[in-house]
Image (cartoon, rainbow, N blue to C red):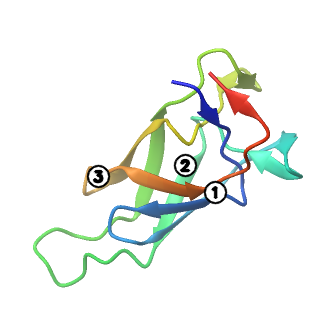
Amino acid sequence: MPGPILHLGATVLCTHAGQATPTTPFPRVTVSGQPVVTLATPYVVAGCGLTGTPTPPCVTAQWLAGAVRVLAGGTPVALQSGTSMCTPTGTPLTPLAAQTRAIAS
């Protein structure tokens, strides 16, 4: 499904309102002046709301599905409409805000 390309400055949260940040975005391709995020880019999650419960809080996350036709460095770019998973909870990331000029499919 087409969607905006995610970048370093995009607002992405885990399902429990923790802030997710890409650790190694792809610096050679930019959108809105920010490096893009590819499916190979891991995320770290800070401030996950799951604390003191039997389920540990989200710590890392990874995009599993993204663009099919747009690549950066040979790897598909992550899309706002893509599929992701947090570890160890297995819940998805929620991209709230991203640039809207570059749409990929």
Please tell me whether residue 56 is drawn above or below residue 42 in the rendered image: below
Instruction: Classify 10 Å Cα crowding around label 3: few (below 14), some (14-19), many (20 and above).
Output: some
Label 3 to label 1: alpha-carbon separation: 19 Å
The residue depicted at 67 percent of the width and 52 percent of the height is: 98
Image location (x, y in percent) of residue 36: 74, 43
Does dot 3 land on a helix, a strand or a loop? loop
Furthest residue toward top:
69
Image location (x, y in percent) of residue 12: 54, 60
Label 1 to label 2: alpha-carbon separation: 6 Å
Q: Is residue 103 left or right of residue 47?
A: right
Proximity of marks 1 and 2: CB atoms separated by less than 8 Å: yes
Does dot 1 land on a helix, a strand or a loop? loop
Please tell me whether residue 51 is drawn above or below residue 91 in the rendered image: below
Task: Give the camera-side residue of 65 and 40.
Answer: 65
Dot placed on the residue nearer the N-terminal end, 1 or 2: 1
Please tell me whether residue 52 is drawn above or below residue 103 in the rendered image: below
Instruction: Say which amino acid is labelled 3.
Output: Thr
For label 2, the residue is: 42
Please give the count of numbered marks on the rendered protein.
3
Instruction: Say which amino acid is labelled 2.
Output: Pro
Q: Is residue 77 left or right of residue 29?
A: left
Dot placed on the residue nearer the N-terminal end, 2 or 3: 2
For label 1, the residue is: 23
